Amino acid sequence: MKLHRRPAEQIAGRPRPWAIFERVARDNLQRLTTALDLLTERKAMKAGWYQGEINLVLGDARQLEWSGALASTLVTSPPYGDNTTTVPYGQHAFLPLQWIDLRDIDSRADAECLRSTSYEIDRRSLGGSKRITASDVETLSRKSSSLRPVLEQLSLHERSDRLKRVVAFMRDLDEAIGRVLPALEASGTAAWTVGSRRVGGKLIPLEQVIVDLAKPHGCAHVNTLRRDIPGHRKRMASRNGSGATMSREHVVVLRRCA
C-alpha cells in the first residue's frame, strides 16, 4: 500500500469501505475458525486457548539477545529488500497504527515511529540506513558468491543508489541472521520465506543469498520450495516505476548442523 492523493473523480467512484471491511473480516474469521478446529483436533488448543507457552518480544532482530533453551524451529519471512524497491512497510503500517493503541501491541512500542507517514518506520527497518562502506561491499562479496556478481554489476550502474540499497539491506539482513541462527539448536530447522526482486534491472537471488549467509553459522541447505504469489493476495503490483517486481516466493529450508 502506498499513500497517494487521488483526483476528485476517483474519490467519487471509490468502493464502499464498510462492505469491503465486512467481507474481509468474514473471510478472516472463517480461516481462523478452520485453524482453531485443526489445532483443537491436535490437542494444541483447549476451550479456545492455546496450550503452549508464548513469549512475544518487540525488538530489533539485529540486536536480538536470546536466553533460555535453544529453539528447535525457526519460521520467518524477512523483508524481500529495502522499502524503496519492494513493499513500503512503513506506509503499509502507518494508517492501521493510527487506530491501534500501541500499548495493545507492547508497552515498549515507541510512538515516535509514527511521527511521519512512513519514513520513520522504514528508517528503522532492514536497509533503512543507506550509509555503506567499502568494507560492507567487500564483506558481503566474500560471504555470498551468489551476491558478488550482482554487486559488481550494480557498482557500474549509472545510479549509485542502486548499489547502496542492496548493500545496506543485505548488510542488515546478515547482521540479523548472525543474531537469530545461534538461537537455533543443533539439528534444528529454519524456514525462510523470501522473494527475489530486481534492482537496476538485476535480479537479486535472495533465496540463494540466504543459504550463503547462513553457512558460517553452521546451517546446511536442505531444500528450496517455490510457489507463485496468488494474484488476489499480492502485496505489490506486478510492475512499478522501476519495472517488474516479483510473482514468485521461495521457502528456503535450512538445518543447523553445529
Image (tube, rainbow, N blue to C red):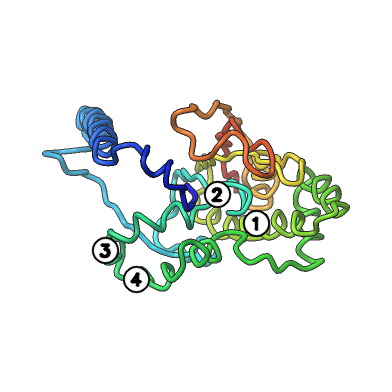
**Left or right of 250 on screen, residue 46:** left
* Distance from Cα at disc 4 to Cα at disc 3: 12 Å
Question: Where is mark 3, residue-wise?
Answer: 101
| Residue type, label 4 | Arg
Mark 4 crowd level (few <14, some 14–19, many ≥20, 10 Å Cα): few
Mark 1 crowd level (few <14, some 14–19, many ≥20, 10 Å Cα): many
Residues at marks 2 and 1 touching, judged by CB atoms closer than 8 Å: yes
| Residue type, label 3 | Asp
Secondary structure found at label 2: loop
Q: Which of marks 2 and 3 is in front?
A: 3
Secondary structure found at label 1: helix
Mark 3 crowd level (few <14, some 14–19, many ≥20, 10 Å Cα): few
| Residue type, label 1 | Phe
* Distance from Cα at disc 2 to Cα at disc 4: 22 Å
Q: Which residue is drawn at 55% across and 65% down?
A: 123
Question: Where is mark 4, residue-wise?
Answer: 108
Q: Position of residue 27 (x, y in %)?
A: 27, 31
Q: Residue at x 44, y 65 (%)?
A: 59
Question: Where is mark 2, residue-wise?
Answer: 79
